[in-house]
Amino acid sequence: MRSREPTATAVNRIRGSAGILGMIALMTLGAACTELDEITVEDVTGTWRNQEFGSFSQVNEDGIYRIAGTIEGLEERPLDIGQWTLEGLLFTYISSDESAVCSAGDRGIYGVELIDENRQRHVRQEDECSTRSTHTLNLERVP
């Protein structure tokens, strides 16, 4: 009668197959993560309209952002102004002392989701400025 115990060769074949499948899964996951990590300064810079509130934000390549109720207000009377940074998928606002609605140094961290080149979503992780703070910002690029 033959033993039902797997032989060492059979076990090694199973482990080898599982290892190959595991490697393929990791490579696929890695490729998916790489695509998500490819948010660049060019992706987030520009003038944006908040689809829910109709407010506008301007994100400049020099690291300055402005938020206002109207597009003209971005230059004339920004409600919030300060520095921004982009690290991976996290966009951070840091209000300056020129901000009308946030305190100097108020930090807001938002996860960025690119929908396409003209639309993105910022999902709040945390924000010290209660006026700026919203759970999700659906932004559309202003031409």
Image (spheres, rainbow, N blue to C red):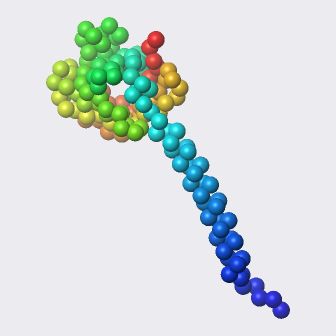
Tell me how many marks there are.
Answer: 0
Please tell me in which quadrant of the rendered image residue 66 appears: top left
Q: Is 80 left, or right, of 120 in this rendering?
A: left
Residue 102, visible in the rendered structure = no
Q: Nearer the viewer, residue 4 or 35?
A: 35
Q: Is 107 left, or right, of 15 in this rendering?
A: left
Residue placed furthest toward the right: 1
The residue at 70%/78% (across/down) is: 9
Please tell me in which quadrant of the rendered image residue 79 appears: top left
The residue at 39%/16% (across/down) is: 47
Quadrant including the N terminus: bottom right
On the image, the x and y values in percent for residue 56 come to: 37, 16
The residue at 46%/20% (across/down) is: 140
Q: Classify 34 as above or below 113.
A: below
Q: Nearer the viewer, residue 16 or 112?
A: 16
Q: Nearer the viewer, residue 117 or 138?
A: 117
Q: Nearer the viewer, residue 34 or 136?
A: 34
Q: Classify 29 as above or below 140.
A: below
Q: Classify 117 as above or below 70.
A: below
On the image, the x and y values in percent for residue 63 come to: 29, 25
On the image, the x and y values in percent for residue 61 come to: 33, 22
On the image, the x and y values in percent for residue 4 come to: 76, 85
The residue at 50%/42% (across/down) is: 34
Residue 133, visible in the rendered structure = yes
Please tell me in which quadrant of the rendered image residue 19 appears: bottom right
Q: Is 54 left, or right, of 103 in this rendering?
A: right
